[in-house]
Image (spheres, rainbow, N blue to C red):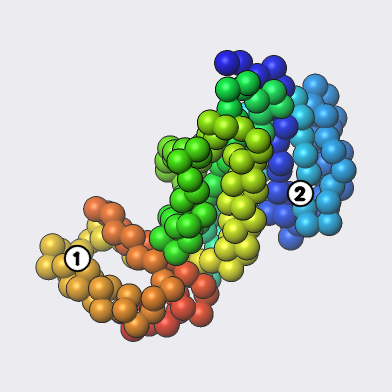
Amino acid sequence: QVFSSVTSLLNMSVFKDHLVLEELIQELQKKSTDLSFGPLQPNGIISVQGSFPAIQSLRDFLFLKAKSLSEKEQRGDQESHQRPQRKLQQHRLSREPKHPSQDGEKQVVVLDTDTYHYMKCFYPKIFQINADVVISDTTDGDVTTVCIESRSGAGQALRVRQKIESQYIELHQVLRKERIDFEKCTREEKERYTAVCKTLRSLHPSVLAIFYNTHLDIIGTSSEIFKFTKEM
């Protein structure tokens, strides 16, 4: 099924420390004349309606702007305790079909992968609904797309999406990530990191440690990350 129009909820708060949001919205309205913009909410949320290609084009434009601001910030501030990478996708672009299928309902939300992993680990019930709701995910690097499908419709998928978004925004405001590279580590050093991590995780149960072949990601609040890495 093809949707001629979608409504997206865009969280612009990622830009509030760098730009005047009202001026940024005006710039977007001039650039994307085929999109319809709703009022900017106090929390930085704004609704955008239009064709899916136009929404994608807007997303790409904002992604590049957010990436540019993030790079400038990194050059000026080398603090290790930082939020998961400040990209537009982290603050999510959720797409709501304007015309749901007659046989059911489908909702899509795009999340930062690190925050999504944290939610799956510590808030699994958000993704465990009932037999009528099927939730699937697709990860592409820093971005994870979550698809929520309800066989019975009746707004179930929308309610689940809203719960996911609410929890995501709350966590994204407080979570930080520390990365430890393994590129120069020997096999024995990697094994030692693994053993130490397992011990520390029992002492810091709210910290998520994710092992990759090339690095270790540690995700949690700023204070917990500081304690965890210091003890490592």
As helix, strand or loop, the secondary structure at mark 2 comes to strand
Answer with left or right where residue 183 lies relative to residue 35: left
| Image quadrant where residue 6 sits | top right
Q: Given the image, on which type of amino acid does mark 1 rest? A: Lys
Where does residue 141 sit, x and y in percent of width and height? Answer: 42, 43
Left or right, 106 with respect to 197, comes to right
Coordinates of residue 176 in the picture (x, y in percent): 51, 66
From the viewer's perspective, tell me whether residue 64 is left or right of residue 196: right
Residue 45 bears which disc, if any? 2
Label 2 neighbour load within 10 Å: few <14, some 14-19, many 20+: some
Residue at image position (58%, 27%) is 104
Closer to the chain start, of discs 2 and 1, is: 2
Q: Dividing the picture into quarters, in which one does residue 48 lie?
A: top right
Which is nearer the eye, 70 or 178? 178
User: Dot 1 surroundings within 10 Å: few (below 14), some, or many (20 or more)?
Assistant: many
Regarding residue 209, the answer to whether it shows in the image is yes
Q: Using the image, determine if residue 193 lies above or below residue 139.
A: below
Residue 212: where, in percent of width, then height?
28, 54
Residue 57 in sight from this viewpoint? no
For label 1, the SS is helix
Residue at image coords 65%, 25%: 100
